[in-house]
Image (cartoon, rainbow, N blue to C red):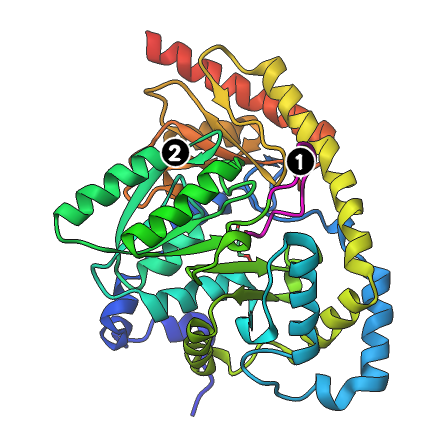
Amino acid sequence: MKERSIEKTEALSLKHEKFFSKKALEMKASETRELLKLVENSNVISLAGGMPAPETFPVDIIGEITQEVIKNHAAQALQYGTTNGFTPLRNAIVEWMKKKYSIQISKDNLIITTGSQQALDLIGRVFINPGDVVIAEAPTYLSALQAFEYYKPEFVQIPLDDEGIRIDLLEEKLKELKSQGKSVKFVYTISIFQNPAGVTMSEKRRKEILELASQYDFIIIEDNPYGELRYSGSPIRPIKSWDDDGRVLYLGTLSKVLAPGFRIGWIAGDPRFINKLEIAKQSVDLCTSTFNQVIAWKYIEGGYLDKQIPKIVEFYKPRRDAMLKALEDFMPEGVKWTKPEGGMFIWVTAPEGIDTKLMFEKAVAKGVAYVPGEAFYAHREVKNAMRLNFTYVSEEKIREGISRLAETIKEEIKKSKI
Ligand SMILES: Cc1ncc(COP(=O)(O)O)c(C=O)c1O
């Protein structure tokens, strides 16, 4: 048989679409990710990504631990592991959650996942029937929407303010849904330094949402990738720490405090939920990389994580401050933004009538990129907002990027007045 180049194979008469499942046919590339491809390899200052700064990765220590693992634990680290995760790592995370967050659990309450992104998909598999009501914050993490979307829920989003999800509106919605005979499966919340809005749910609302969960019989998915990245204000306990009822499934990850390349996350919750999630994970990947889990265990056990967190905080704080200052200095009247005490993002709202998706190419032409806000809404209803990241580029670039963005917005405002 003659060899064919890849280009030629694509030109064959094979009707590839007919082989796809209905679900695969429904999968769409995210418009936002397509837009962001415009920015790759250009000189544009990207405030769009959600990535940690590589300068914060503890490269030397990871190198040392890796060598030690190969020398002393190779048989275990290079082998398959159990689906629920490497027991010493689970124990180390249990201890960490007790110490840090007053969350009292045992290793039976914990499953290691391949990043918390996998946790979101497993939650979709285990909990969502088509048409089930899933409530999220408005706006919410766009890849959570994508993960849940596959299982066809009915999405309801409840607006946020500076204290997190609006409990009054949530309660109103719960009553309305009940009167329509619909029940809610779960509420998904990023309760600390929210992605994309940067806000934190107040302690009062944390307790109120737990009360509503028990009154209306739903569970809470509390996703907390950013909680350790606090630059100001006082620590706050996760909702999970007040959960006497087993209604909260807590999602953690090492992505923002160690490195996302490890792909290590976890779900903590009632063992009856954890067991089902474990069965769901078996067919997905058998287990999370044992090699990475052993290194992560050594890293936590060696006390390195405790030392690493203040270093990251020290690195990011000036970047958060630089972005807030630049917004203050450059943005025209009518533009509003959140003032996060931690995390990686600021949410900017332009005046009504400005469509940040339509404005995107103009901003890129001026040399700055952001994520248009509509992607953070299942029904794409908000057009005039955007998410900005302050962890990835330097303070100088942040200032220059915000200045370019402010110019773009000013031009849009001027145009809309003509
Ligand atoms: C709110 C939220 N949840 C989950 C994730 C996924 O994180 P990972 O899979 O790297 O643990 C992210 C990543 O940015 C996130 O912002």
- Residue in the picture at 46% in, 69% down: 270
Label 2 Cα crowd, 10 Å radius (few <14 / some 14-19 / many 20+): many
Displayed quadrant of residue 85:
bottom right
Residue 44 in picture, x, y percent from top left: 60, 35
Badge 2 element: helix
Residue behind mark 2: 357
- Residue in the picture at 35% in, 71% down: 126
Q: Is 234 within the magenta?
A: yes
Q: Nearer the viewer, mark 2 or mark 1?
A: 1
Depth check, front residue: 370 or 302:
302
Query: Tag 2: residue type?
Result: Lys
Instruction: Kindly tell me whether mark 2's CB lies below 8 Å from ligand 1.
Output: no
Task: Please identify the residue farthest to the front as the structure is shown.
Answer: 244
Residue behind mark 1: 234
- Residue in the picture at 73% in, 28% down: 396
Residue 195 higher or lower than 242, as above or below: above
Task: Judge whether residue 201 can be spotted in this image.
Answer: no
Label 1 Cα crowd, 10 Å radius (few <14 / some 14-19 / many 20+): few
Is 121 displayed left or right of 44 in the figure?
left
Displayed quadrant of residue 373:
top left
- Image quadrant in which the N terminus is located: bottom left
Task: Please identify the residue farthest to the left as the structure is shown.
Answer: 180
Q: CA distance from mark 2 to mark 1?
A: 36 Å
Q: Do residues under tags 2 and 1 come within 8 Å of each other at their CB atoms?
A: no
Query: Tag 1: residue type?
Result: Ser
Q: Is 70 within the magenta?
A: no
Query: Over which residues does the magenta segment extend?
Result: 224-236
Q: Main secondary structure of the magenta part?
A: loop
Is 346 displayed left or right of 101 in the figure?
left
Residue 110 in picture, x, y percent from top left: 56, 71
Residue 256 in picture, x, y percent from top left: 65, 52
Badge 1 element: loop
